[in-house]
Amino acid sequence: MSIWQSFSATTKFSTIAFGVTAALGLLSMGVLGALLYYPVQFVFNSEYGSLNDWSGDWVWPTTIAVGMFWSVGFILGNLAYVFLNRYLPSVLCYAAYGLLLWLWDLLLWYYFLSNKM
């Protein structure tokens, strides 16, 4: 328990968010993954269209997988925050954290859409 208390607030948040979003990614049965498509849809809209245009056996597992793998973005965001906090103000570090979550979402959707897992 003393190890947990020694963590910063951002690390505690990232750890809890990782666990919660990993569980929600699975338990929501793809709803989280589908919701994560909307912030990046404008990037893929010309080639892949909207979520409603998709069909096939790859769609449901992809939305579940993206929702689950997106949770890793919280760990990556925390690592970026800890590194950048030495050099930048906290506001910019939090902005980088959010940007990294969005970029991770974009990367996941790009990978899964290009491979149609």
Image (cartoon, rainbow, N blue to C red):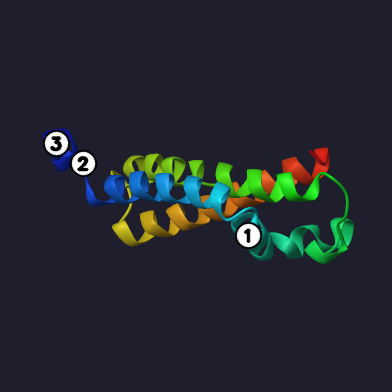
Left or right of 43 on screen, residue 49 = right
Quadrant containing the C terminus in the rendered view: top right
What residue do we see at 63% from left, 60% from top? 31
Q: Which mark is residue 1?
A: 3
Left or right of 59 on screen, residue 1 = left
Local SS, label 2: loop
Closer to the observer: label 3 or label 2? 3
Along the line of sight, the residue nearer the viewer: 80 or 1: 1
The residue that mark 2 highlights is 7
Local SS, label 3: loop
Q: CA distance from mark 3 to mark 2?
A: 10 Å
> Residue 42's x, y, as percent?
75, 65
The residue that mark 1 highlights is 31
Label located before the other in sequence (3 or 2): 3
- Above-or-below relation of 29 to 86: below
- Above-or-below relation of 117 to 12: above
